[in-house]
Image: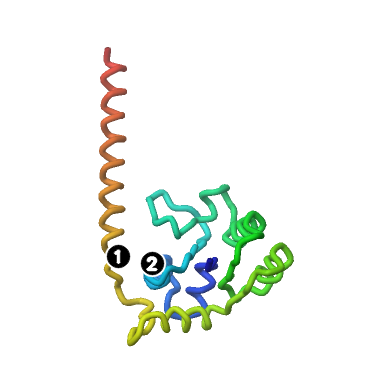
Amino acid sequence: MFLVDAYNLAYSTGKAVSFQEAYRMALEIANRLMRRGYRVLFVFDGSSHTPHPGYIRFAGEKRKGMTADEWILDYVKRHRGDTIKLVTRDRSLAEKSRQIHPNLYVMDPADFLRFVSSLSEGETFRGKEPVETYDIQLKMLDEVEDFLRELKEKKRRRRRRRHRR
């Protein structure tokens, strides 16, 4: 299992500094790893009100104000028996995680990206380039948002009708 401090990975490349770029990077990397049978989990700070793949987590969805570091430490604590490769350059997070999970392996983001790139012969990590699945997911998220907006509007209309009676 690769447990990835998503923003830390993105910032360490110098290529992905916005949320969209970091998210796109996570999708591309997850696609490569999962095609080869690896498990991966990307943890972002903040929260999201739109659906996202199961391999992407937002710390704020678990508890309001929770940081990605706190989420990762909690995960490591709950999965002490699992083999975990934590991808981060955050020394404090790495040390705290090792104290909780003595068999945890900490991987530098640069080494992780080299490993991911080596999984696809002839392909190199593209970072900011669009990923086909990203565009599909954005379209799906837009459709979900439209659907939810329509549901809310229908609910408002029903309330108005009830109040008029």
Q: Please provide percent x and percent y for residue 53.
A: 39, 56
Q: Amino acid at mark 2?
A: Leu
Farthest bottom residue in view: 122
Q: Is residue 150 left or right of residue 111?
A: left
Query: Which numbered disc covers residue 120?
Result: none
Q: Please provide percent x and percent y for residue 101.
A: 69, 64
Query: Which numbered disc covers residue 27?
Result: 2
Residue at image location 57% in from the left, 47% down from the top: 63
Quadrant location of residue 128? bottom left
The answer to whether marks 1 and 2 mark residues whose Cβ atoms lie closer than 8 Å is yes
Query: Whole-Å distance between the Cαs marked 1 and 2?
Result: 7 Å
Between 49 and 28, the one lying in front of the other is: 28
Which quadrant of the figure contains the C terminus? top left
Quadrant location of residue 164? top left
Precedes in sequence: disc 1 or disc 2: 2
Q: Please provide percent x and percent y for residue 6.
A: 50, 67
* Residue 122 drawn above or below residue 25: below
**Residue 29 visible to an observer of this rendering:** no
Q: Amino acid at mark 1?
A: Thr
* Residue 148 drawn above or below residue 42: above
Quadrant location of residue 91? bottom right
Task: Look at mark 1 in the image and give the residue it sits on.
Answer: 133
Q: Is residue 157 left or right of residue 88?
A: left
Question: Does dot 1 land on a helix, a strand or a loop?
Answer: helix
Between 15 and 52, the one lying in front of the other is: 52
Q: Residues within 10 Å of mark 2 (few under 14, many from 20)?
A: many
Question: Does dot 2 land on a helix, a strand or a loop?
Answer: helix
